[in-house]
Image (cartoon, rainbow, N blue to C red):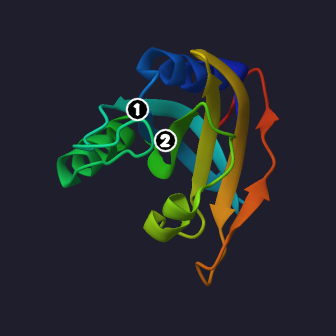
């Protein structure tokens, strides 16, 4: 994943704002040479009805709105992000079960006692059996 420090800060901020519940949203950008270039995020309210400190949910309307926002910016949905309140920034078993898009970036920010700490990125293996850690590279500016 290639992005800017400002976008990483926005993901961290959303995790802190949502604490002690999970925050979630979409990563918008482009794909070049198999690498997701994240140029914007789209915050989404956590639609999970229960256990919001350990789970998040998105609705079909959230997907449609994110796709429309991406299209208006000349971008695509290239992944998702969510926070792990008081839990490490690595995918859980639930994250693996619910992940459906190989090639997307799944970013996770750990938020401990209300403060964002680690931020990691993962990609779903083509056979959907596991996540593989994805490097996070930053640029001051991103070109399309």
Judge from the rendering whether residue 61 lies leftward or rightward of residue 12; answer left or right.
left
Q: Position of residue 38 (x, y in %)?
A: 60, 39
Label 1 crowding class (10 Å Cα cut-off): few <14, some 14-19, many 20+?
many
Number of labels in the image equals: 2
Looking at the image, do the residues carrying marks 2 and 1 touch, with CB atoms under 8 Å apart?
A: yes
Q: Position of residue 135 (x, y in %)?
A: 81, 48
Q: Nearer the viewer, residue 42 or 99?
A: 99
Judge from the rendering whether residue 77 lies leftward or rightward of residue 57; answer left or right.
right
Q: Say if 48 sits above or below 132 in the image.
A: above
Residue 140: quarter of image: top right
Q: Say if 123 sits above or below 80 in the image.
A: below
Q: Which residue is mark 1?
A: 42
Please give the name of the residue rendered at 42% of the width and 35% of the height, measured from the top-left corner.
Answer: 53
Work out how far the residue at label 2 is from the one at label 1, CA to CA, in angstroms.
7 Å
* Residue 115 appears in the rendering: yes
Please report whichever mark, 2 or 1, sits nearer to the chain's N-terminal start.
2
Residue 85: quarter of image: top right
In this view, the residue farthest toward the left is 61
Please give the name of the residue rendered at 49% of the width and 61% of the height, measured from the top-left corner.
Answer: 94
Q: Secondary structure at mark 1?
A: strand
**Which quarter shows the C terminus?**
top right
Mark 2 or 1, which is nearer the eye?
1
Q: Say if 91 sits above or below 11 in the image.
A: below
Judge from the rendering whether residue 82 lies leftward or rightward of residue 87; answer left or right.
left
Q: Secondary structure at mark 2?
A: strand
Label 2 crowding class (10 Å Cα cut-off): few <14, some 14-19, many 20+?
many
Q: Which residue is mark 2?
A: 28
* Residue 1 appears in the rendering: no
């Amino acid at each position: 994943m290639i992005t800017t420090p400002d976008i990483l800060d926005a993901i961290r901020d959303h995790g802190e704002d949502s604490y002690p519940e999970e925050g979630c949203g979409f990563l918008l950008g482009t794909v070049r040479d198999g690498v997701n270039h994240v140029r914007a995020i789209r915050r989404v309210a956590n639609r999970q009805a229960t256990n919001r400190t350990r789970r998040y949910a998105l609705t079909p309307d959230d997907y449609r709105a994110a796709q429309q926002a991406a299209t208006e910016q000349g971008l695509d949905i290239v992944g998702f992000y969510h926070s792990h309140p008081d839990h490490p920034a690595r995918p859980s078993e639930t994250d693996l079960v619910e992940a459906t898009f190989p090639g997307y970036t799944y970013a996770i920010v750990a938020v401990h006692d209300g403060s964002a700490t680690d931020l990691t990125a993962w990609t779903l293996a083509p056979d959907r059996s596991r996540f593989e850690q994805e490097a996070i590279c930053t640029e001051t500016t991103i070109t399309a």
